[in-house]
Amino acid sequence: MRFVHDTLPQRVVFASGGATEGVATEVGRLAAARVMVIAAPAAAELADRVTRGIPVALRHDEVVMHVPLDVAERAREAAAAHNVDAIVSVGGGSTTGLAKAVALTTGLPVVAVPTTYAGSEATDVWGLTEGATKSTGSDRRVLPHSVVYDAELTLGLPKRMTVASGLNALAHCVDSLWAPKADPINAALATEGARALADGLRRVDADPTDLAGREHTLYGAYLAAVAFASAGSGLHHKICHVLGGRYNLPHAQTHAVVLPYVLALNAPNAPEAEARLARAFGSATALEGLQSLRAALDAPRALRDHGLAEADLPDAVTAVLPVVPPSNPTPATADNLGALLRAAWEGADPS
Ligand code: NAD
């Protein structure tokens, strides 16, 4: 074996029902005295509860998906005006994303408390949107200093969002297996992440209040994000990035729809990834396992249901083609990408 693997330095606290104590401990370790709490209005009550034990100097609740630049600027100005020395984010990927945008220019340490399975808290990737263009980059300053995972905070995540967000996490696992920096370590994380997510999501779908199922899903989502953080973006993420930024499609649902089509394209030329995923799903083939999970969860099916216009398909192919990673197992062409996106738009059978 010859490979180089980067591991990101971060404290991870797993404590169902223990977010308040966990956040107080992490903020105490930073010796922070003026904390900015970022949480969307819908997460205000969760944020109240979780931040009870820390010195809050500022509550900021302007959270918008894909972090528009003006939203980031206002948060940065608020952080400076209140002279804060740390940030606690309570929410999904959009909330974590805003905390990262502030950290990017200020260097403030972030304690992230995730409430979805998006996984942004475990990566050093930031994203900002200006007009119709979403830019991303990677910078160690945006990697949260600590993550406090409390599965109880995900009990209220609505069923549709639970499924979409869980499949977003599963997409991190699948795409990691052929991403530019895929290696045996992130493959191991991705495989265990896929197993945990498939198992956890079935349990949560049967009973959204099943705390052990929620814990298993959150654990899988963390592994997925760590695998993605070190393997980088594969074809699936490149496609979803273009769709999300250019046509403002919802992040998790877009990932949930596109994943089987990318798997169907790549699996024939990625036998090891295919075998790993089939084992993780306990199925004869990876695609069969994914499709059976998607059917059980009644997963999002078609991009046309989530705001993509048919007329945008040719433009999407043109935008994706130049950013396809050279590592992709099946060489991408205008023809096979066009067919993939049309099938995903229609919700056609990926095989
Ligand atoms: P989100 O944060 O926008 O949340 C989706 C919806 O769920 C919102 O309406 C939110 O209020 C609600 N919600 C969240 N948690 C809840 C809970 N526990 N109970 C009830 N409702 C809840 O969506 P997301 O999918 O978590 O994140 C998407 C964003 O994260 C995108 O902008 C994406 O680009 C970014 N992201 C970044 C990375 C990275 O590594 N940088 C990784 C994954 C996602």
Image (tube, rainbow, N blue to C red):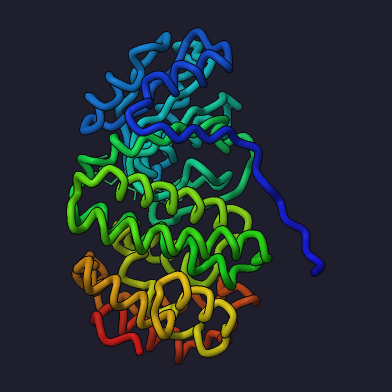
Residue 75: % across, % down = 41, 27
Image quadrant where residue 40 sits = top left
115 left or right, relative to 298? right
282 left or right, relative to 349? right
Relative height, residue 68 to residue 335 (above, below): above
Depth check: give the residue in front, 35 or 3: 3
Q: State which quarter of the image contains the C terminus.
A: bottom left
Visible residue check, residue 44:
yes
Residue 166: % across, % down = 34, 57
Residue 80: % across, % down = 50, 17
Q: State which quarter of the image contains the N terminus.
A: bottom right
Residue 57: % across, % down = 40, 10
Most extreme residue toward the right is 2
Visible residue check, residue 314:
no
Identity of the residue drawn at 19% across and 68% down: 298
Identity of the residue drawn at 26% across and 27% down: 46
